[in-house]
Amino acid sequence: MRRALLAATALLSLAASGPASLAADDAPEAPYVDDRSSAEAVIRSLYSAINRHEFARAWGYYGDAKPAKDFDSFVKGYDGTDKVEVTTGAISDDGAAGSIFYNVPVAIRATDKSGGEKVFAGCYTLRQVNAQAQAAPPFDPIHIEKGALKPSTADFGEALPPGCGDGPPPPKKDTALEQAKKAFLAAYGDQCDKQFLGNEPEVFSIKYKDKDAQPGDPDKETRLFHFSCAAAAYNESSVYYMTDELSAVKQLQFAEPKMDIRYENNNSDGKVLGMSIVGFETTGWAVNSDYDADTHTITTFNKWRGVGDASDSGTYLFRNGDFSLVQYDVDASYDGEQNPQTVVDYNTAP
């Protein structure tokens, strides 16, 4: 078991048990430590700041969930405390949703100005957000999420918890989501706008009956993950991943017709003389897309120019465990009006 003996002031839970604060001119000098490289280093830095009466720095080692209702209450929580000895134990960690959560066992021996001693023990939980996913400031470093210590009747040398398994667990890992995020970053990490790379995808659950299901068979479930990737002047591109019947994650491919469009005088500004389908192709990109959970459809709308008077759009329906093209519309005329023509219509297909 790794132990670090530090000079510091009492933890928040200690502050809640009695009056608090060190007089700045009575506090022993302590070394300046400001280290965010590990969970243990953050705890060490916290106590360095408190021992040096740098309470603003100590406050900053916490995340959004602060240890007191306000900063003044936090500072007052250390009145009357002379020193605190601290030991840390074996640190456990668990990953979840782009973060690593660290659980740090802690025991402290707090000494007040009259020489009285009290022992407290418990755990800190710290969080490290994936640095590569943080595309815009402010940067979120390793920080303290919470700390919970309780009075202990054990001697200081025996009070350290063996672990933090009894504390609040980090969020349960979503394996399918993590697989989808990993696949997305591997395939599109160097193609997508950085502003989107740190965002969590939209996640949808689709319950359905298999086409061969017998009466009484349970519903099956497919999960859909929508990742925004890039935004241009008037089109936003996305990619989708979904789980199949074996819960593996795959990227969704969208079928599109290849069009032969003929214009008057061979000029796209001219009148449309005719359109015909000359084949089909697939793409992993979905432009200006939306998923409707009520109808189980994904729609796309690709503007050929900003006003949207020329465009193509697709409707993809979920059935039998996958999405398939049921309608495709093309507006080939650059006439200032939205007047698409349906070129594919499978809406009546089973």
Image: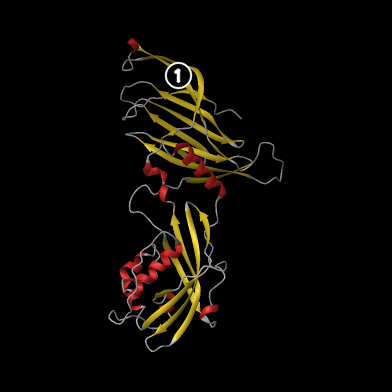
Give the residue displayed 60% in from the left and 39% down from the top.
244
Q: Nearer the viewer, residue 293 or 306?
A: 306
Percent coordinates x, y for residue 108 in the rendering = 46, 77
Give the residue displayed 46% in from the left and 83% down from the top.
118
Amino acid at pointer 1: Met
Number of numbered discs visible in the structure rendering:
1
Q: In which quarter of the image is the C terminus?
A: top right
Percent coordinates x, y for residue 41 in the rendering = 42, 64
Residue 293 in sight: no
The residue positioned farthest toward the top in the image shown: 265
The residue positioned farthest toward the bottom in the image shown: 114
Q: Nearer the viewer, residue 78 or 219?
A: 78
Percent coordinates x, y for residue 162 in the rendering = 57, 70
Question: Which residue is label 1 attached to?
Answer: 259
Question: Is residue 254 depicted above or below 197 in this figure?
Answer: above
Percent coordinates x, y for residue 60 in the rendering = 35, 65
Question: Is residue 231 depicted above or below 334 in this figure?
Answer: below
Give the residue displayed 45% in from the left and 74% down from the top.
86
Left or right, residue 229 beside residue 280: left
Determine the image quadrant of residue 332: top left
Q: Is mark 1 on a helix, strand or loop?
A: strand
